[in-house]
Amino acid sequence: MNVDEKIDSYEDEEITKDRSIVEKTDCVLFLDNDKNWNSIKMREREAPVKPKLGKNRLEHPSSLIGEKWGTVFEVRGPTLKKIPTLAWDVERQITLDNLDETSRTGKDNRELVDDNKSQKLTQKEIVSIRDQSEVSAEILIDKLCENSTTFNTKHELTQKKYRGKKTKKHVQRYLMLSADGWNTNELYFTKKSEKIMHMRMEALSQILTLANLCPHNDTQVLIVENCSGLVTGAVVERLGGLGRVFNGYSEKHPCISIAYDMLDLTAWAKTSIINFHLALLTDTKLTKKELNESWDSSAVCGERKVTLANVKKWICDDLCDSLIICCEYDCLSLLQYLWPYLAPGNPFVVWSQHLQPLIQVFQYLKTTNSGLAVNIRLYDNWFREYQVLPNRTRPILDMPQMGGYIVTGIKIIDLQENK
């Protein structure tokens, strides 16, 4: 099969593949009751090792194939049982209507004493009931309420909160989500934030918006990042596999495992990633034979072959439509190095988790060599979640820090170039 035939097969895959259900090549993300994230790579499940979800080992993970994204599961022993989606958010079932109705019962909590002696069931008995696959969550919670000596004396709104609290503690429920850019970013920010330079979700969305990414066949995006491929994969996802995404690196090998292994990208979309060493742009010692040698552009898929000469021509002669820098290097030096390869009239975005490197970039663009760019801005992001309930809407009090700082602008032709 030649390259053109492989490209046609990938295009057929894009048309026929149903992106609303789980397939055997997908990476599945799970969000539990306490907002903890887990992941299972379906393509690795042919091995004899059972995948781990939380503290449980699943016996039949292949049963997830064909299920729709957004399905809610409940852990019952070593298996997952599908439950109604409305049972996912327990807190939203507590409304002020319950408070209005129960305020006339005369019950209150003034006589309650929190001495941890009200529950008659022991921990071993609770675990034995919970591990029975035929016992549903409602039966377990009902038994806990029946064996609580203070449950019937509580205010009815407090009873509902008690049931919700016990459900979160003893019943493991998971919401199955696809590994798109937002969900994958939230997973890594929660569990392994150092691998993505502690980049928050709103920072990534701002980068994609400010870069003005347009899904066209001629789009070329130049990226240098140290976020394990999160930014590169998110750009490919936004472009839908169209255009070329150049990922520059300075180490021996590119490190963009998230784009290849985690994100829900098709094989055709992954071939739009072209990894190249940053020294290629200014290296004059390469022979003609080395420039014309074909090498694997995607480093994993290996289906679209290009040469070093092609890459150098695309970047140096055709220029790029967007420039994105999210790295731990000297941002100013890197921007100066890549500046000639950004076409005039196109945006650039420089992100860093620290303010000082971006102040240097901002001052350089504003004061030195005036005329390099317009609409230059330096700002930070603050994203905050809100609890939305009737008459109880408020911001979440316990939130992590902000998502770094951004310098952005639009490159123009320098005044000296017009002379």
Image (spheres, helix red, strand yellow):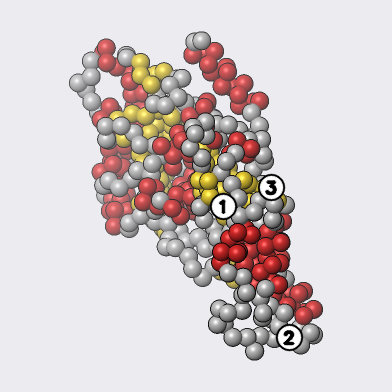
Q: Is residue 312 above or below residue 325?
A: above
Mark number, residue 31: 1
Query: Upstream in the sequence, badge 3 or badge 2?
Result: 3
Q: CA distance from mark 3 to mark 1?
A: 14 Å
At 53% from the left edge and 46% from the top edge, which residue is drawn?
57
Query: Upstream in the sequence, badge 3 or badge 1?
Result: 1
Q: Is residue 206 above or below residue 18?
A: below
| Kind of residue indicated by mark 3 | Lys
Q: Position of residue 75 (x, y in %)?
A: 61, 51
Q: Residues within 10 Å of mark 3 (few under 14, many from 20)?
A: some
Q: Is residue 167 above or below residue 269?
A: below
Q: Quadrant of residue 252?
A: top left
Q: Is residue 309 visible?
A: yes
245 on left or right of 279: right
Q: CA distance from mark 3 to mark 2?
A: 37 Å
Residue in front for this viewpoint, 181 or 320: 181
At 59% from the left edge and 22% from the top edge, which residue is drawn?
11
| Residue beneath disc 2 | 107
Q: CA distance from mark 1 to mark 2?
A: 36 Å
Residue in front for this viewpoint, 269 or 356: 269
